[in-house]
Image: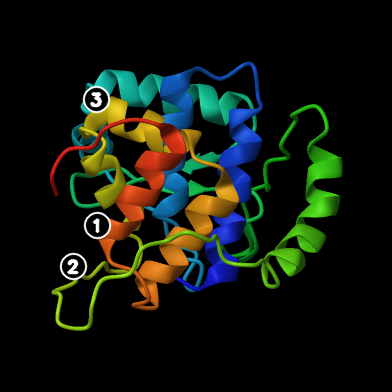
Amino acid sequence: MNKKSSYQKLLKINEAARDERLTAHDNLVFGRLVWRVNLTTGKCFPSIGLIAEELSMTDRGVSKCIARLEKNGHLKRIIHRGREKANDYLIPGLNTERVFHKTGTEVPKNRNKGSAQIEKETEKEIEASEEQVPIEGVARTSACCERKSVEEGQFQNKLADAFRGGEQGWVAVMQLPRDTLEDLEARCLNGKMSVEEAVAVASSELGVEVAKL
């Protein structure tokens, strides 16, 4: 996941967070779906059971959240029947161009107040993010210290686990400023910072203790 695609996903999560019609659980579920979108292939098909396990929720609770997200225009489900076929989740602005055109399904329009203005400013914000100055005051380990690697798409999982995991962990992650979260993920993916260092910065930002990774 490159820096620009990561920022696009953060914008979608932040847009949903400003929708007063959604609950905290709705936003947690939406965040998991957004981060599982493959922007190259347009695919996003995690099972409800997997999302429920990651967020320490019930399958029924996750299903209700997805239904509310769809009702309010944040995503569209393409339901596949059979045990071996998971549902596709299509999110406006992320995978709609690749997937909706193939299926012939109408692209949902996000009905959030101010969403048109948000979309208009998205491109400028993404371009500006390329020139952002990295946050200061980040401690670095010596070359001989072992660093924990982080795979693409797994950074926020590790960060949530460090904040006690489950719903509590994801609430903490979503409270981080998006520019800070984006910068920390980019540094970890580029090998410029270990996961432990990123957790320390996030902990200092939020003023909370973390569990040992």
Checking the image for residue 93, the label placed there is none
In the rendered image, the quadrant that contains the N terminus is bottom left
Q: Nearer the viewer, residue 158 or 72?
A: 158
**168, above or below 23, in the image:** below
Labels 3, 1: front one: 1
Give the mark nearest the N terminus, 2 or 3.
Answer: 3
The residues tagged by marks 2 and 3 sit, at their Cα atoms, a distance apart of 32 Å
In what element is the residue under mark 3? Answer: helix
* Horizontal side, residue 31 vs residue 125: left or right: left
Residue 114 x, y percent position in the rendering: 83, 33
Taking the spot 47% from the left edge, 59% from the top edge, the residue there is: 137
Give the mark nearest the N terminus, 2 or 1.
Answer: 2
Checking the image for residue 148, the label placed there is 2
Q: Nearer the viewer, residue 102 or 88?
A: 88
Q: Residues within 10 Å of mark 3 (few under 14, many from 20)?
A: some
The residue pinned by badge 1 equals 196
Q: Residue 110 occupies which quadrant of the picture?
A: top right
- Is disc 3 in contact with disc 1, using a CB cutoff of under 8 Å? no
Taking the spot 78% from the left edge, 62% from the top edge, the residue there is: 123
Q: Nearer the viewer, residue 157 or 31?
A: 157
Checking the image for residue 59, the label placed there is 3
* Horizontal side, residue 196 vs residue 20: left or right: left
Residue 87 seen from this side = yes
Residue 189 x, y percent position in the rendering: 37, 72
Give the mark nearest the N terminus, 3 or 1.
Answer: 3
In what element is the residue under mark 2? Answer: loop
* Horizontal side, residue 183 vs residue 36: left or right: right
The residues tagged by marks 2 and 1 sit, at their Cα atoms, a distance apart of 8 Å
- Is disc 2 in contact with disc 3, using a CB cutoff of under 8 Å? no
Residue type at the position of mark 3: Asp
